[in-house]
Amino acid sequence: MMETQLEANHLERIEELENRLADAEQLIEAIKAGEVDAFALRSNNKSEVFTLQSGDYAYRVLVENFNEGALNITEEGLIVYSNKYFHELLGLPYEKVIGTSLREFLHPESIATFNFLFSAALNGQSKGEINLMGAANLVPVYISLTSLYPQLPTIGAIVTDLTAKKENEEIKIYLEEKVKERTAELQTKNIALENTNAELASFSYVASHDLKEPLRKIQTYSGRILELENFSGATQDYFNRIIKSSERMQNLIDSLLEFSRANMSELIFEPCDLNTIVEESISDLHLSILKKQATIEYNDLPTIQGGHIQLSQLFTNLLDNAIKYSRTEIKPLIKITSSIVKGKKIEHSSANHQKEYHEIKIADNGIGFEKEYVTKIFELFQRLHHKNEYSGTGIGLAIVKKIVGNHNGFITADGRSDIGSTFTIYLPTA
Amino acid sequence: MNNIFLIDDDEDDQLLFTDAIELINPALQLDVATNGKIALDQLKVSFSLPDIIFLDLNMPVMNGFEFLTQIKKETQLNKIPIVIFTTSNILRDKELTKEFGAQYFLTKPNNFKALRIELQQILSTVFASD
């Protein structure tokens, strides 16, 4: 019984030793293949590390294939080792680099920096940026020098190519400068524009006033002559034509004056009940409404923040337009409706998706217009009709657009010939 | 017999105004001054004061607003009714001249007939209350 136990113990021990032997053989194979640089053995509860001479091979492979330049330099500066990356970086064959002083590859302006870094490295480590002269071009690099003393009487260097980074930096600096230039240009232009705008506003105001004076005289004198003398029918007709032409010009000047007045500087925002404003416009247009037997329907219009006078003019112009461009065979019917819509639901480049808008529609059953004029009708002096057909100065809708813009909104027009037109105003709710 | 005093630097307006007054009633007496300063100097030494003054706003040397301010201080003159006679049709001007003491505001019409009719109306109102 005792002997059997002993035998079993031996067998177990043999198996354990066989396993350890297999492990050891595997390790030796690995060492032979250069797969192992070092190994640790545990004895007496302490690890002992054994490095292997053949491990250098692995390090060489590593350093040689490094994606950075690696050099070994003597204390005099001679390159005794260069990896592939470094001589390729310089664009030179290996033989031209090995045994040459690193100083020969320095850009003249980098010599002082390099000497400083190199003498610092003799006593330890140093890092810095220098420029190298490659075969074809200058190569900006970041170099890190480490003294390998006392194991080796040399200095190790890791060289990082900065070409791409420098290029990026240059591009960035270039772009920044460009942006600065453009900003300055724009600022100058902005100031010039503001001045021009102010000049234009005052010019058109003064011009309108001064232009009106002689015109008023032409009209008054013509009327005076007509009242004084008994002219033939033809002469009377000519005088009436003078008066009519002057009146037309007067209207043009008045509209221009209105256009120049419809600017931001005269705008004071206050709560404006659009129902009241439409009522006022209707009372302003009382005569033409009566003449054309026009009906204007509106209800539950919102109260918005805006300039009372400008909003009043906005509705007067739009209603005047709708009454003026009515069809002869049908009485004008104008409907004003309002609702609230989300900015993102509006198909218009000016719509802010974050905002909500009052959508105010002014729809008529008038002569309408062709699709191609959708944007044109808001331009200054654009007339779609001959002045004999419909009186108009071509300024009314330009004023409308300007006023809507002053209220941070936008306007669209939709029309169909001989069906009617719909103007839609979008004003932000807040 | 009624006296009218027009203060206006514009020759055309003087001519047309004179013409219209002549048509309304040839017997009406009309004096003209070309700015507020001249008018004020004349009025201060005049023996026969006008029954009504027509005053332009935009004039050299002394404009209509200054004239209104000055005449207010003159106890012999500040009872004469004043009609603003101007090209302006700005509401602000209308309200302002009222504050300065003007009773009427007549925008110079571009139609002679309208001028004649409006003048006639104002004159008959003012002279009726004499």
Image: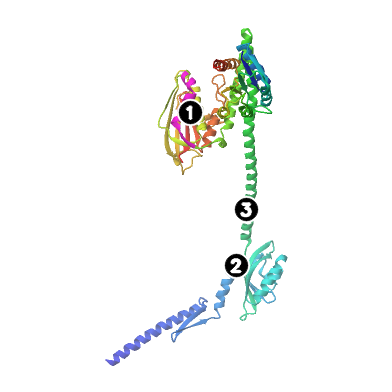
Q: Chain of mark 1?
A: A
Residue type at tag 1: Gly
Work out how far the residue at label 3 is from the one at label 2, CA to CA, in angstroms. 31 Å
Residue type at tag 2: Glu
Q: Element type at marker 1?
A: strand
Q: Quadrant of the N terminus of chain A?
A: bottom left
Q: Which mark is residue A415?
A: 1
- Magenta stretch encompasses residue A294: no
Q: Nearer the viewer, mark 1 or mark 2?
A: 1
* Residue B91, position as x, y percentages in the image: 55, 28
Residue type at tag 3: Glu
Q: Of residues A89 and A365, which is closer to you in this image? A: A365
Work out how far the residue at label 1 is from the one at label 2, CA to CA, in angstroms. 70 Å
By secondary structure, the bulk of the magenta-drawn segment is best described as: helix
- Magenta stretch encompasses residue A274: yes
Snapshot quadrant of residue A384: top right
Lower position in the chain sequence, tag 1 or tag 2? 2
Verify CB contact (< 8 Å) between mark 1 and mark 2: no
* Residue A142, position as x, y percentages in the image: 63, 66
Magenta residues?
A270-290
Asked if badges 3 and 1 are on one and the same chain, I answer yes
Snapshot quadrant of residue A387: top right
